Image (spheres, grey):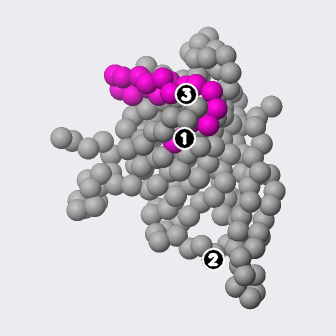
Amino acid sequence: MAQKFRRVVTGHDAKGVACVVSDQDAGHILQRPNRPGVTLTNFWQTDGTPAEYDAATETCDGPFVLHPPANGTVFRCVEFLPEDPEVLASLDGKSAFAEMGAGANIVEGARHPFMHRTDSVDYAVILKGEIFMLLDEEEVRLSAGDIVVQRGTNHAWSNRGTEPCVIAFVLIDGVTDRALDGSARTGTPSR
């Protein structure tokens, strides 16, 4: 059973007084057979910068997409159950990511079937458990309380332990260099 999250959203009443406008379990959840043992829960999305704090009180309606909207953000938690290497070897990362509009984000031939990259800056906080962050050649063991700033790099998450791992993410739409034009603004930077 995946972890449930209570989501409290504040706002203002008709007189401009701060109040709670929503207090319920977060309901924008994605679980799928193409990525068993992983549950994504979206809490909030913005679709521009600066973000509008007096806009709609429900921003997560619609399809579940991996990346944030253009010039926007996504706030979510992902629960990773321990991986079974035999099951993992039989999975197709491209189809699983295609279900989130991100089949092209998979890194073909990588050492993990869910190695991917997004044009975003992602803030991650490991809330519970342990996980390995795999990069092209390196891997880092992370534990509860650790922080990651993921800057458009190829990466995958691998729970090799025995307990679930929960990570809170804020994904921010990004570019390699704002001074560049067109497709040169995205993708893997060349140095």
Determine whether, in the image, residue 145 is placed left or right of residue 136: right
- What's the mark number on residue 158? none
Residue flagged by tag 1: what amino acid is it? Val
Residue under label 2: 54
Nearer the camera: disc 2 or disc 3: 3
Quarter of image, res 174: bottom left
**Under tag 3, what secondary structure?**
strand
Q: Position of residue 20 (x, y in %)?
A: 77, 69
- Residue 50 shown left or right of residue 56 in the figure: left
Q: Amino acid at mark 2?
A: Asp
- Whether 146 is drawn above or below 49: the answer is above
Q: Main secondary structure of the magenta part?
A: strand
When the figure is inspected, residue 153 is found, relative to residue 87, above or below; the finding is below
Which span is picked out in magenta? Answer: 124-142
Residue at 63% of width from left, 27% of height from top? 129
10 Å crowding of disc 1: few (<14), some (14-19), many (20+): some
* First-in-chain label (3 vs 1): 1
Q: Could you tell me which quadrant the N terminus lies in?
A: top right
Circle 2 or circle 1, nearest the eye:
1
Quadrant of image for the C terminus:
top left
Kindly state the secondary structure of the residue where label 2 is placed: loop
Is 137 included in the stretch rendered in magenta?
yes
Q: Secondary structure at mark 1?
A: strand
